[in-house]
Amino acid sequence: METRKVVVIGVETIGPGLAVDLSTQDYEVLVNDIASSMIARTRDWIRADLFMYRTPVPAYRERDDETLFMRMTFTGDLAAVADSDMDMDVG
């Protein structure tokens, strides 16, 4: 089975960077945390700093921020992670 949808559970430390990295590699990424305030803050933070996340990696520099951001879904609903191909608990 090919992995196409990945869930990143926990966004406190490395979760945001991992979500961006997976998105640049063409995965659909579900960003999940139990704290709704963390989900909102992470979404806003990634949106504001997406260019800075991808600039250090030469292969990612030409990627379109909007396309990368649209590959990410942000939710606190654990039921939403049920159909993922792979889960990464980093919280």
Image: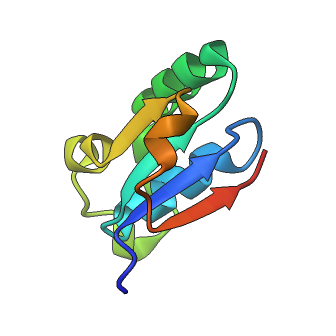
Display coloring? rainbow
Q: Residue at x 59, y 44 (%)?
A: 16
Q: Residue at x 72, y 54 (%)?
A: 89
Towards the viewer: 16 or 49: 16
x and y percentages locating residue 77 in the rendered image: 52, 28
Up-down relation of residue 90 to residue 45 (above or below): below
Q: Residue at x 52, y 41 (%)?
A: 31
Residue 13 location, quadrant: top right
Is residue 52 at all visible to an observer of this figure?
no
Residue 34 location, quadrant: top right
Outermost residue to the top: 37
Towards the viewer: 22 or 65: 22
Is residue 35 at all visible to an observer of this figure?
yes
Q: Residue at x 48, y 29 (%)?
A: 75
x and y percentages locating residue 2 in the rendered image: 35, 84
x and y percentages locating residue 9 in the rendered image: 65, 46
Outermost residue to the bottom: 1
Q: Quadrant of the N terminus?
A: bottom left
Q: Quadrant of the C terminus?
A: top right
Up-down relation of residue 56 to residue 15 (above or below): below
x and y percentages locating residue 27 in the rendered image: 35, 64
**Side of 14 relative to 2 (left or right):** right
Q: How many labels were placed on the picture?
A: 0
